[in-house]
Image (tube, grey):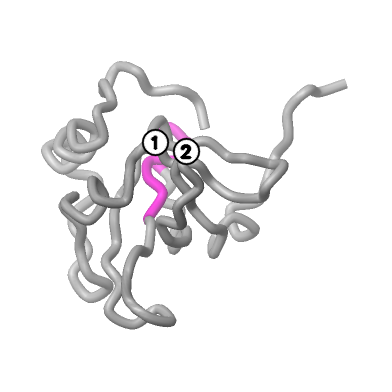
């Protein structure tokens, strides 16, 4: 019997994201899949704004978050002030997430070693 759970990507979209302190950091807007590895490349976090208007989007490496199945949310290891200072993008101007330079910058921003990639 398997000791892990599989979740559909669509069931995770809209899920709340908190930090370890329990602060609300936003919601999962999209889940980006790498078509070569078939793994999650990034979670796109929607943060700020009111009712989805004026929010900023952030690409979050999967290694920076974990799923809390008990509370049905994601936990991101960053405080709210750090997230406010992070480089994001808006809904009308998405970056090229397949660009290796973009990946390197995102991983560095969240203190994740690119070699630390795990299966998703």
The label on residue 20 is 2
Callouts 2 and 1 close, C-beta under 8 Å: yes
Report the residue at 34% width, 63% height from top.
47
Q: Where is residue 18 in the image (x, y as percent from the top left)?
A: 48, 49
Disc number for residue 8: none
- Apparent side of residue 9 relative to residue 44 in the rendered image (left or right): right
Q: Where is residue 10 in the image (x, y as percent from the top left)?
A: 60, 60
Q: Does the magenta stretch include residue 40?
A: yes
For label 1, the SS is loop
> Looking at this view, is 100 or 62 the one in front?
62
Which residue corresponds to the image point at 27% horizontal and 72% vertical from the top-left? 91
Q: Is residue 36 above or below residue 60?
A: above
Which mark is first along the chain, 1 or 2? 2
Q: Which residue is found at the position 56% from the left and 59% from the top?
A: 15
Give the camera-side residue of 78 and 39.
78
Residue range corresponding to the magenta coloring:
34-44
Q: 24 left or right of 116?
A: right
Residue 54 against residue 113 in the figure, above or below: below
Q: Is mark 2 on a helix, strand or loop?
A: loop
Query: Which residue is disc 1 drawn over?
Result: 77
Farthest residue, direction front: 21
Q: Residues within 10 Å of mark 2 (few under 14, many from 20)?
A: few
Whether residue 111 is in magenta: the answer is: no
x, y (%) of residue 75? 50, 41
Locate residue 46 relative to residue 120 in the image: left or right.
left
Mark 2 vs mark 1, CA separation in Å = 6 Å
């Amino acid at each position: 019997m398997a000791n892990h759970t599989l979740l559909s990507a669509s069931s995770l979209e809209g899920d709340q994201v908190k930090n370890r302190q329990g602060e609300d950091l936003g919601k999962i807007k999209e889940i980006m899949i790498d078509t070569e590895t078939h793994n999650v490349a990034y979670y796109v976090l929607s943060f700020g704004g009111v009712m989805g208007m004026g929010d900023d989007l952030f690409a979050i490496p999967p290694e920076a978050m974990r799923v809390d199945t008990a509370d049905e949310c994601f936990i991101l290891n960053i405080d709210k002030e750090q997230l406010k200072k992070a480089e994001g993008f808006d809904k009308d101007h998405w970056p090229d997430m397949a660009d290796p330079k973009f990946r390197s910058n995102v991983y560095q921003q969240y203190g994740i070693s690119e070699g630390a990639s795990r299966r998703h």
